[in-house]
Every structure is written in structure tokens, then in C-alpha cells.
Image (cartoon, rainbow, N blue to C red):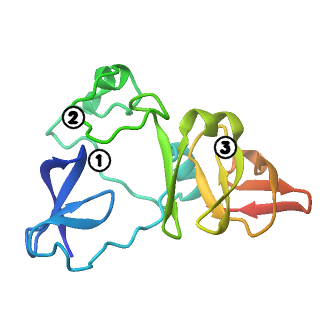
Amino acid sequence: MSFGTSGWLFQSNKLMYDRGTNSLWHQFLGEPVVGELVGSGIKLQILPSTLTTWSNWLAAHPDTTVLDVETGVYPVEAYLPEGAPGSTYSTYRGSELTMFPVPERSNALPKKSRIYGLTFNGQARAYPQEILNQTQVINDSLGGGNLLLVTPQDGGTRSYQRDDRIFLTVEKGESGSSELILIDDEGPWVEDD
């Protein structure tokens, strides 16, 4: 299936369209919400992803290629990192106001809080980014499984199934590599990107 961006939102979430039927898809849920595929039972497979810095990614994957930002369409200065002052939505991110109405709200966190969302065995949980940045290692259970969330000091939360082990801390590999060494009472467990 091939998708494009519709430019429309549904419940403040971007809608994609599939080029085969022009059905509109909720990108967060991976389900069609308007068009002939609604009710078909088709759901997109959620793939693992990593949120990290370019330097960490490149250290772990030196053969990676990317598109050049010098396209001639926008000046290079327009591609500022998301959190940088002057980036496209920096003023909006710094404001408490929302751009669009949000019909379903929770008062559990402040508006527009950054979270790490995780779904496992049909259950979902939101982890506030500020807690992940402070804690670095979180042992948790969700959907009947034991999980481990790791946030190294340079960012980029990752989640793993941990069986029954309880992890205590995380260290970087030798010479600043992207390798993580997770420590529990049984000893180290190494994870490579």
C-alpha cells in the first residue's frame, strides 16, 4: 500500500490517504477512518522505531544515507532541530494553547506534555519524557508482560521485553559507542543498535 499526506486532521492527528482507494487513515492508530476501507478490519503493522540524535545514529550505522537538505525549495536554515529557537513550531511548543480543539483531554499531565507512548499486548501507557530523562531505567509491566524502558543521558528512549530480570542502571559502551550495557543483579546485558 502506498500513502500520501492528506493535509487533514482527525482528533488533532494527521490523516494519511492510501493511493489505491483514497481512504483516509489515522496515522497513530494505523486504521482507516473515512472511505471504503472503514470496517474492513485492515490495520497497519506498527514497526519499531528509534528516536535518537543524528550523531548517535551515524556512529551505530555509518553506512546510512539521507536526503540532502539543500533542495533549493527551502533554505538550509529552515531545517532547524525541532526544539531549537526559531524552528517552525518553536513558538507554538512554548505556548500552553493548542492549535486545534482537543475533544478528549486528561488532566493527568500538563497540556502538550512530551511522552513516550507504548502499546503492548493491546494495552497502552504514556511515560512523561521528564521522568524518563531523570530515571534512565524503568522496570514496568504492561499487557501481561514485563518491560524495560531505557533512556540514555543523550536521549532516545528504547523499550524491551525483560522477562523476570530487574535492571538497575545503564552504561555506555567503550569509547562512547552507541552500545548500551544494562546492569542487573545477575550482571551485564549488552544491547547493540
Residue 70 at x, y percent in the picture: 24, 41
Q: Nearer the viewer, mark 3 or mark 1?
A: 3
Badge 3 is on which residue?
A: 152
Badge 1 is on which residue?
A: 68
Residue nearest the viewer, comparing 180 with 185: 185
Q: Quadrant of residue 184?
A: bottom right
The answer to the question of whether label 3 and label 1 lie on touching residues, with beta carbons closer than 8 A, is no
- In the displayed structure, would residue 77 be above or below residue 66? above
Q: Amino acid at mark 1?
A: Asp
Q: Nearer the viewer, mark 1 or mark 2?
A: 2
Q: Earlier in the sequence, mark 3 or mark 1?
A: 1
- In the displayed structure, would residue 71 be above or below residue 5? above
Q: Residue drawn 26% across and 78% down?
A: 42
- Where's the C terminus, which quadrant? bottom right
Residue nearest the viewer, comparing 70 with 132: 132
Q: Quadrant of residue 155?
A: top right
Badge 2 is on which residue?
A: 101
> How much space separates mark 3 and mark 1, taking CA atoms?
28 Å
Residue 124 at x, y percent in the picture: 49, 57
Q: Residue drawn 40% across and 68% down?
A: 46
Q: Amino acid at mark 2?
A: Pro
Residue 97 at x, y percent in the picture: 29, 23
Q: Nearer the viewer, mark 2 or mark 3?
A: 2
| Residue density around tag 3, few if under 14, some if 14–19, many if 20 or more, within 10 Å | many
> How much space separates mark 2 and mark 3, taking CA atoms?
35 Å
Q: Residue drawn 40% across and 25% down?
A: 84
Q: Earlier in the sequence, mark 2 or mark 3?
A: 2
> How much space separates mark 1 and mark 2, taking CA atoms?
36 Å
